[in-house]
Amino acid sequence: MNDEEFWPRYLTAHSDPRTRAIHTAGTIAATTLLVTAALRRDPWLALAGVVAGYGPAWLSHAFIERNKPETFRAPVRSLVADYRMAFHVLAGSIDAEYERLGLAAHR
């Protein structure tokens, strides 16, 4: 499965806008913390970045989507797709992306 085949599957697992919002916030927080950790060479801050990124996202899958995170099946593709989804959420184009792919998204 390539990235373009994985993308619709990833979006289907993130159909609720609350999940997408939580993922986007986690992605921003994790990226900020991980970059800061690298600049400061602080492993504890790096750990906080990982927890800030994955913790809320996994909880949103358990309690909102009621599915398993795609990270467990395809970790690298999921990471790339997470940034792609965050871009679409922040750009306001996520609904158009669901429509383009013919996918149903909660509103």
Image: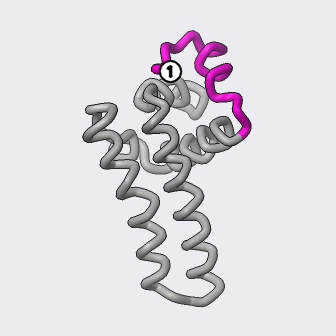
Relative placement, left or right, of 63 versus 30 is: left
Answer few, some or many: residues within 10 Å of disc 1's Cα (few below 14, many 20 plus, some between 14 and 19): few
Q: Amino acid at mark 1?
A: Arg
Residue 63 occupies quadrant: top left
User: Compared to 31, does 60 lie above or below?
Assistant: above
Q: Position of residue 46 (x, y in %)?
A: 48, 77
Residue found at the far right of this picture: 91
Q: Secondary structure at mark 1?
A: loop
Left or right, residue 106 beside residue 94: left
Q: Residue furthest bottom?
A: 41
* Above or below 85: residue 22: below
Please say which color scheme the image uses.
one colour
* Residue 8 in picture, x, y percent from top left: 52, 23
Q: Position of residue 22 (x, y in %)?
A: 46, 46
Q: How many marks?
A: 1
| Residue 94 magenta-highlighted | yes
**Residue at the spot 39% in from the left edge and 66% down from the top edge:** 51
Q: Nearer the viewer, residue 25 or 45?
A: 25
Q: Nearer the viewer, residue 41 or 106?
A: 106
* 18, above or below 25, in the image: above
Q: Residue at x 49, y 14 (%)?
A: 104
Q: Residue at x 58, y 34 (%)?
A: 3
Whether residue 64 sits left or right of residue 49 in the image: it is left
Q: Where does label 1 land, which residue?
A: 107
Q: Which residues fall within the magenta stretch?
A: 91-107
Q: What residue is rendered at 59% in x and 19% in y?
A: 98
